[in-house]
Every structure is written in structure tokens, then in C-alpha cells.
Amino acid sequence: MFSGFMVNTWIAATLVAVIAGVVGFFVVLRGAAFVAHAIPHGAFGGAAGAVLIGVNPLAGLGVFAVGGALGIGWLGRRGRHDVATALALVLMLGLGALFLSFSVEYAAAIYSLLFGEVLGVPSDELLPIAGLGVACIAALAVLYRPLMLTSIAPEVAEARGVRAQRIETGFLLVVALAATMTVPVVGVLLMFSLMIGPAATAGSLTRSPRNAIALSVLIALATVWLALAVSYLTNLPVGFFVGTLGAVWYGGARIWTARRRGRTASG
Amino acid sequence: MNQVLRALFAPGFFASDPVHAALVVGAVVALVTGAVGVFTVIRGQAFAGHALGEVGSAGGSAAFLGGANPLWGFMGVAIVAAGLIELLGLHRPRARDVATGLVLGAGLGLAALFLYLDATSSSTTGVAVTILFGSLFAVSQQMLPSIVALSAVSLVVLAVCYRMLLLSSLSSDLAAARGVPVRALGIAYLVIMAVAVSLAAETIGAILATALVVGPPATALRLTKRPGGALVVAGLIGVAAVWLGIVLAYDSYYWPPAGHGWPVSFFVVALVFLFYLAAGAVTGMTQARRSRRSERAARRTASGCAEHPGDAA
Amino acid sequence: MNVPVPDPSADDAILNVDGISVWLAGREVLHDVRFRIMPGEFTGLIGSNGAGKTTLFRVILGLQTSSTGSVLVGGRPLTHRNPIIGYVPQKVFFDPDMPLRARDVVGLGLDGHRLGIPLDWGRRRQAVDAMLDAVDARRFADARVGNLSGGEQQRVLIAHALISRPRLLLLDEPLANLDIGAEGEVVALLARIAREQRIAVFISAHDVNPLLPVMDRLVYVAAGKTASGTTAEVIRAEVLSALYGQHVDVLRVHGRILVVAGAEGPPGVTFEETDGVAAGPGVVSL
């Protein structure tokens, strides 16, 4: 379980989990789950394109993720935000379908792009993943306070001269960066699960933003490590475990807080 | 004339059976998703609509594993997911967003599992591609009656609930005060949406179904102000996108790279997107002109009434 | 529209609104509005929903341009992001699921508009604690803000606005949705802040009565037009009748003020438009 390829996988998974935990906190805070789903998912089209022309999928993902983030920001200013997100997403996926139909590389490669692949992390991809991760965290640290303020009280932020539009774009770009680094391990679809489940769980268990971020990272780590280990042992896809564990944590946390609240109310 | 037609429709277009089926199925499905989707857009449920499509793909792949037609598995899982979203989502927008996200995340996990099992158990490669990206030309003839029947049922239910649904979409408080069972209506609507999304998934694939459910209605709502009109316009735009998509996909066999058709789903999505952008450009221009004119007119009347004792102290 | 008042020198005014008109979507929302607010004064902005109160606030905050007139804040022309003004918006919805404490909200008032990482944690914490004490919110400083009562959330928001040391505090309908007890506490707190720290408080409300004991002056808005002065000067039948463009009676009952639309005049006149609270002639809960 800890030899050869798998060591790389563990390292990459750990990096991905840390980023997903941190970014996920802001996704849940802002109610931006759809965008957080659309950007990595749409970026899949880019990866398919990159495979077609024989470039590193990471590059294709990056181009589509950033393009998608900017496109959603642009369209969202001119119409309903959720409609803009949906249409940008399907356009990118439609392109993905086109690229796939031309591609000779079929089912297996696509499947691993979508749902992740345990044994798919070459050593030379670890450095770019780590670099993207550091960039994500740094960008969020810089954006932290205006991001919080625009999430909580947009009118106040506006009155104090915060350009909500720019902060939003910055945030979408961070999501795009995070999406780009996910391919090798969890795949574009499951990165999303990893952002929502742990962050929502942490949010219902803690009170301060800082604790929520820390807990979110811990839960994301637990999710990924557990999923990898079980996937290795059962030979079932890692995405299945990542996806369902997120929901399990959240359900558990809800039941726990409800029972605790019931006890304090009766006692 | 004949030459134009030949340039537009590649040889054999009107003689091909799969094309006939695709035209019929595509039109029926586009009408249903157009009508249902108008409420999806008004109610701000594009995310839920998209999530149902993707979660449904877990059902589709499970049905494939069991040898059933994916449509049934698709619809079953999508309806269950609709119930879960409504159950977990409470009434707050943020909680709804998280609930939808969690259901989607879990559903994707299941899809990962079933698609994997599909791939290992059957010799056919590319099950994932078929279920996720679909192909209108592959719709089996024997599914046609079921698709038409399901579409008709959805449209009838939608027509019955129409006014209630409109009122509760505009203001749930107002609807509740009028005695509309808002919660039950919300669940009923999500179920109709699940059916519509499943039908769309059957035609252009699970993860592109959103294009038909959101695109034409959003375009229609930009072009017309009346909700009733929007239902019809959305349906027509959807039909136009699907039919044009079919024609282009059929023609594309003669495009480079030679001997290889471009996927019909791609054309449908691209057309839907183009229509949306075009509608935005058109309404943007007319709106700017109208508001400039009305402000000028209002200023003129205001200055004309200046002697009127507006400020009386 | 101005009722004659002893003219305070324009240079000393913390807020000087001089003849502004605002057009929105081809409609005149505010017409020739003029009034002044002096440092430490407690001023009410009274009017029904849709009368133009929020628009007036947006003009003062520099978020909405006016077609005519000028606004001076602290003797200087308007700027976007004015540090002299603190703002408490009308609707802030704190989701109970959001991991956010009262102290986090107050802290964002200090530096929420800045990029980067705050460095002096110690001093920041002290400032937040002091502010929480000042609005009597220390006991729920570490509670989830979404679980607090309406009055407690309002205190947190006031602290959020005050911590950047403004000289003018704008509050948009802070008393809406509060029960009577909480209403009185928030008003008393604001009056104390105005008196002790010489911060001008400008507060919008659709009911004048909760503000009567503490209000120095008021600005009355109806149908985009305003009248300003002391309560006794503005809340009079002649002034309000002129403002509404129809006969209005002012009744004083047990120290409360009721504004009653007159029965004369054409039926169904502008009252419905000018006052969303009252549908047709009847008693307006002013």
C-alpha cells in the first residue's frame, strides 16, 4: 500500500485534500457549490482536448478552468448567475464530448479523468500540484478579509469600497487553480465532493471561521486517506468512497448536533 | 432550390431511420424540457436541475449493469435525489445549495462505482461515454412510445399545476397565504424536473441534459416577458437547437476528419449557447434604447409640471 | 420644502445634503432633497417603505449618483469608501449554519475591506473586545451570530459599523423586525453613542414613535420629497399635507403620534403610492 506508485498517490492526495478543505470552506460560506462543481467539471473538456493534441492534461485543465472561471464571471454579470454557470459548464463539456469523439484514447483514460485513478501519479507531476496548491492558499490568504465581508454583508462591503466583482473573480480563479491540480487523484467530479462534504461538516461543528477551516482540512484528509486505503484493498474506484464519505460525515455531524441541542434544551 | 437543400441536408438524411427517430424524440424532449425549464430558471434551480442529471447517471449506469434500459434507472434515481434535496434543503438558500451539493457529491460517487462495474463486467468499452455524453442517433426505437408517453404526462401535470407553480415561484409567502401547499408543490416540481432531465439525458447525455433544461428557457425569458409565452418560445428554441444539431451532426460525416461524424450533443449544446448569447445581445440593445427614451420622456413631463406646487413649504 | 430652522453654519455640519434629485429607471425617486446634520446629532429619516430612504442612503454612501445637487460629508465632497461614515444595512441575513461568531463580524468592521493578512492580532483583539463592551455585546461575543436574537444581531452590526471610528453612523431600518423591548434598547444604545462619542446618528424608520424620546431632528420623506426640522416643526398637519399632496391630520395620543389621512380629496388618491403601509385613507402607523 505504501510502495512505488502509491507513495506518490498518498502525497498527491494529501495535497489535494488540504486545498479542497480550505477552498471548500469559502465555497460553502458563499453558497457557491454550483460554481465549484462547474469549474472543475467543465475543465474536463480541456483535459480531453489536451489528450487529443498530445499535451499534458494538466495544461488543458488549467486553460479550461481559468477560461470557465472568467466566462462565468462575465456571463453572470449579464444574466442570472446560476444560468450563466450552467451554460458555461455545458459548453465546456460539449467541447469535451467533441474532443473525445475524435480521440483514440477511450474509456479508461476518460474514466480516470472524471473519477480519479489511484495508480496514476507520476513523480514529475507532484511538483506542479504542490506549486498550484501553494498558489491557492496564498491567494486565499490575501483575499481572506474582503472575501468574508462580501460573503456576509455585500452592501457594507460595497459602501466601504470593496469591488465585489473583482473579489468574486479572484475567488473563481482560486477555484480554477484548485480544479487544475485534481486530475491525478480524485478526478474532476470528485474534487467537488471533497470541497463540499468536509467543509459543510466542519461548518456545522465549529463556531469560528478559523476552526472551521482547520477542521475542514482534517476531515478532507481523513476522507481521502480512508478512501485511498479502502480503494486499494477492495479494488473499487476511489471516487466512490470519496463521494459517499462526504455525505456520511455531514449526516453524522447533523445528527450529532441535533442530539446535543436536544439534550441541552431538555436539561 | 434543390441544390440548396442538398447542401443543407446531406444525402440520405430523410431516408435514414435513426434520423427519423432522433427528430421525433428530440422534438418531444425539447418541448418538455423547454416548458419545465422555464420554472427551473424562474425558481433559480439550475443547480438542482444539473445535479439531478448527474446523479441520475448513477441510476442509468446501474440499470445498464442490470440489463434494463438506462432511462428507467436514470429516472428512479433522479426522483429519489429530488426528494433528498427537498428534504435536506430547508428553506434557506445557502442550506439548499449545500444540500444539492451533498446529494450531487454522493450521487457522483455512486456513478463512479457503477460505471466502473459496467466497464469491468461488460465487454463494451465506452459505457461511461454513452451514458454521460449520450447520442441521439442511438436512441432505440422501442423506447419511443415510453418517451412520448412520459413527455405527455409531464406536460399535463405541468399544465395542471401551472398557475400555482407560477405564484409560488414568484413569491412563496404570497402562495402560502393563498393556501397553496408550497412544500408539496416544490417536491412535485422537482419530480417533474427529474423526469424532464432524464428524458434530456436520454437524448444528449446525462451531463449535457442541463443545456436543454436551462438554455432555451433562459433564452426565452430574455425574449418575452409573459411566462405563458416563455413556455412556448422555450419549447420552440429547444426544438430548433435539437433539429439543427441533428442536421449538422449528420452533415458532419463529410467534414474533416473524413469519415467521422461530430457528436450531435456538441452541436445541440453549442447552438443553445449561441441562441442565449444572441438573445442577450438583442435585448441588451433594445433595453438600452427604451430606457434612454423613457427617461427623456419622463424628464420632459417633469420639467413641464415644474410650476405645479410639488414643493409646498 | 425646508421648514425654517436656526441656520447652523454649513462648515460645521457633518452632513450637508443640498438639493439632490435622483432618477432611477426613468422615474424621479428623490426630488430636491436638502437638510443638514450636525456632529453628535440624532436624526431620524422617517417615511414609509418605498419612499426613497434607502436611495438617499445610497447617495450619501457614494453608491448612487444624483442628477442634481451636492452632498458634503465632513465638509468635503462625496467619495466612494468614505471612512467618516459607518453603515448598518437593512437586511443582513446570518445563516445559523454559518461558522461565524459575533466577534468575527465586528473584526471585519475594522479591516474587512483590506487585502492581505492582518499582522497585529493582539491589538485587533483588544479593539474588538472594547467595541463589544461599548455596545454591551461581550456576553455573546463567542456565540454563533446566526443563533443570536434580532436585537443582539443589531448590536453586533452597530459594533461592526462603529469600530472603524466613523463620525456619522447611517442605519437603514434597524428597528424593523425587533420586538418592543429590543427596539427600546437599541434606540437607547444609539442615543448614548451619539451623546458620549459625538457621533452623528442618522437612522431610517417607518415609525416615528420609538425615536421620539431621543431624536434631535428628523427628515420626513414622502413620494421622494422631504421636509426637515425638529419633530414639532415637521410633524404638523400643514407640512405633511403639503408633502403628501392631500389633507393629513396629526393626532397626539398618549405621547404617541398618529398621522391620519383625511377623508376629503378625491377617493383613492396618491396615498397608496406614497405610503405602502396604509392602503387608502385611514390611520397610518407613523
Image: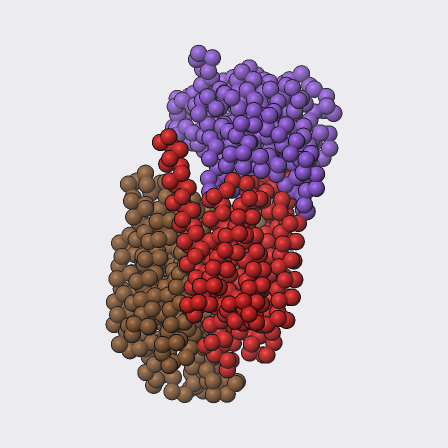
- Residue C99 in the image, given as x and y percentages of width and height: 51, 42
Q: Position of residue A38 (x, y in %)?
A: 50, 61
B193 up-or-down from B132: above or below: above
Q: Is residue B313 left or right of residue B165?
A: right
Which residue is found at the position 40% from the left and 50% from the top? A251
Q: Colour of chain B?
A: brown
Locate the N terminus of chain C by quadrant: top right
Q: Colour of chain A?
A: red
| Coloring applied to the structure | by chain
Q: Nearer the viewer, residue B184 or A176?
A: A176
Q: How many numbered discs sit on the rendered protein?
A: 0
Q: Quadrant of residue C159?
A: top right
Residue at position x 46%, y 30% in the image: C149
In this picture, residue C71 sits left or right of residue C248:
right
Q: Residue at x 43, y 70 (%)?
A: A235
User: Looking at this rendering, what residue extends furthest in the top direction?
Assistant: C254
Relative depth, front residue between A167 and A47: A47
Tell me if I can see residue B205 in this picture: no
Quadrant assignment, res C281: top left
Which residue does the image show at 32% across and 57% down from the upper left?
A: B80
The chain that appears purple in the image is: C
- Residue B102 drawn at (x, y percent): 43, 54
Return the residue nearer the eye: A155 or B171.
A155
Q: Position of residue A51 (x, y in %)?
A: 56, 76
Q: Nearer the viewer, residue B171 or C113?
A: C113
Whether residue A12 is visible here, answered yes or no, is: yes
Question: Can you say whether C186 is above or below B228 in the image?
Answer: above
> Height in image: B73 above or below C175?
below
Taking the image as shown, residue B287 lies to the left or right of residue B209, namely right
